[in-house]
Amino acid sequence: MMWFRRILLRQVPSTSMDLRHEIRWFATAVGHVEQNLDHFTKVYTTGYSFFDQNGNRIAKYGVFWGPNDPRNAIRTLPGSTNVAATLTAILEVIHMAREEEPPPSLLIYSDLQSTEDLLKNLRDYAKRDFYLRRRDEKMKNAEILQDLFSAVQGLHLKVIFY
């Protein structure tokens, strides 16, 4: 139990010189990473769902390319979940980027944390044809994941979860 307390105590904010040095180094490192991403086209996505007054699930997603960009969109997916909406938003961004010649390098910002593992392991899931490990049923959103896997082939992109 004492070991656990030490870990928690190190996370408490402090104004010590060591912590200020670490923050300064981290800020410099983040700035360096952002400089390397300047050649990427930045796109922001979001997805959410809710129940209407009749108890029907409605999902919506948004795609933001930049101010006054005609590709900006908010779309509705009746009967879908927030995960499906977010994955669909990312898929729409990829399809729109593929319409350009050559397709730009994409930096996609997504707000749904649970999609991070899905996208990191997309290749492994594709090897199993998007079945669960038990192989008796497909994963949720398997169709969207299959489309995503096909769409990202040969495309240079990064997805950042915020």
Image: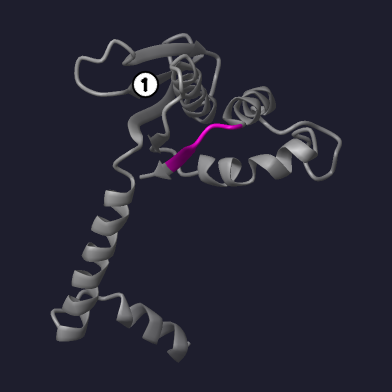
* Residue drawn at (18%, 70%) of the image: 24
Q: Is residue 55 visible?
A: no
Q: Position of residue 123 (x, y in %)?
A: 68, 41
Identity of the amino acid at label 1? Gly
Asked if residue 93 is among those painted magenta in the image, a careful observer would answer no
Residue 58 percent across, percent down from the top left: 47, 15
What residue sits 44% from the left and 21% below the top?
97
Tell me: 126 left or right of 44: right
Image vertical order of residue 97 relative to residue 22, above or below:
above
Residue 77 shows in this picture:
yes
* Image-quadrant location for residue 154: top right
Percent position of residue 161, x then y = 41, 44
Extreme residue in the front direction: 102
Residue 107 percent location from the top left of the image = 39, 37
The kind of secondary structure element at disc 1 is: strand
Q: Which residue is mark 1?
A: 62
Residue plotted at (45% across, 18% down)? 101
* Label 1 Cα crowd, 10 Å radius (few <14 / some 14-19 / many 20+): many
Residue 117, placed above or below residue 23? above
| Residue plotted at (80% across, 39% down) | 128
The residue range painted magenta reads: 154-159
* 118 left or right of 12 in image: right
- In the rendered view, would you say 128 is above or below 47? below
Q: Nearer the viewer, residue 31 or 132?
A: 31
Q: Is residue 70 above or below residue 151?
A: above
